[in-house]
Amino acid sequence: MRALHPKLQALQAQLAPSPLQRLQDEVFSNHGVECWIKRDDLLHPVISGNKWRKLKAILDEALRIGTDTVVSMGGAHSNHLHALAYAGKCLGLKTMAYVRGERPGTLNPTLRDLLAWDMELRFVSRSVYRELRNYKAHDSLPDLRAGQYWLPEGGATELALKGVAEIVREIDIDYDVLAVACGTGTTLAGLIAVLPAKTYALGFAALKGGGFLNDDVERLLMGLPVERREWQILLDYHFGGFGKTPPALLDFIRQFQSRHAVALEPIYTGKMFYGLYDLVQKGHFRAGQRIVALHTGGLQGNRS
Ligand SMILES: *Cc1c(COP(=O)(O)O)cnc(C)c1O
């Protein structure tokens, strides 16, 4: 990869390492499997986890082509918008976002941060929001003016895959399974694109009815020379859907946190680890297999 734009290098210098740690747990040892956790949650207090990975090459391109404003979309608790607004502020790029639903009377901590970082917010109806999902390329949004760069929901573009690939390059052990939570499936696609031989990727859909993810991941991988594509998305660990927080899930997250001193959130990483534990207990993995689970961060969403 060529050198990052100097402004991005300055932002990258704020990052902490993302260590790979062994998760010691009887549940794993009883079934003869090993589980490791790749701590992308530690990368940065704001641009945590996969959001930095996805934004890196995108913002690099945006800066190189003379962008002044990045325009994107997301929900009111969006980790993507949170990371984008902060990065924009650091890079001297203006940011604007279409936010799903009506402007709430009281702004949640995520929205307050977005405004504090000077992101311009436009609240749109669910139908307008859905319509915006049709625009994929950075110049495809109608009425974009010169200098504006369109970034689809969740940063789901082929460029995002480049930064995600660095996660795989950093994992310096042999492993059989790479587990990740899926929202748009972009992170999963980026991992699949560079998986080592013999390793397969296991995605856990955060949304209910996530079957569309299979097509979206295929679409993202289409332009890439990926020969071996072993991956699967599990659709049944959504716990009622995006943003739902049933007690069983919250209990699991609390237990996980007290046992491992690693915080999870209920939208993505809580569901993935719940799913992993469940699969291990059901004998899904062969004895001797080694699993690496990606902690994609997102803990800012826990504030509300
Ligand atoms: C955004 C996010 C995801 C989903 O990433 P996709 O690339 O959209 O699939 C997973 N985990 C966390 C913590 C996130 O914030």
Image: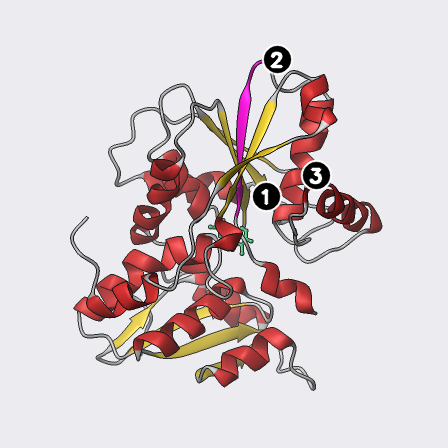
Q: Is residue 223 above or below residue 68?
A: above
Query: Does residue 27 appear left or right of residue 146 in this picture?
Result: right
Q: Determine whether the residue tagged by mark 3 lies in a helix, strand or loop.
A: helix
Real-space CA distance between mark 2 and mark 3, rounded to the nearest whole angstrom: 19 Å
Q: Residue at x 32, y 58 (%)?
A: 56
Q: Nearer the viewer, residue 28 or 161?
A: 28
Verify whether residue 292 appears in magenta. Answer: yes
Q: Residue at x 63, y 45 (%)?
A: 209
Magenta range: 286-295
In percent of width and height, residue 203 lies at 54, 37
Judging by the rendered image, the residue that carries numbered circle 2 is: 287
Judging by the rendered image, the residue that carries numbered circle 1 is: 205
Q: Determine whether the residue tagged by mark 1 lies in a helix, strand or loop.
A: strand
Q: Name the front one of labels 1 and 2.
A: 2
**Tags 1 and 3 touching, CB below 8 Å:** no
Q: Is residue 6 above or below residue 216?
A: below
What type is the residue that disc 1 sits on?
Ala
What type is the residue that disc 3 sits on?
Tyr
Instruction: Looking at the image, tell me whether mark 1 or mark 2 is earlier in sequence order.
Output: 1
Q: Residue at x 68, y 42 (%)?
A: 260
What type is the residue that disc 2 sits on?
Ala
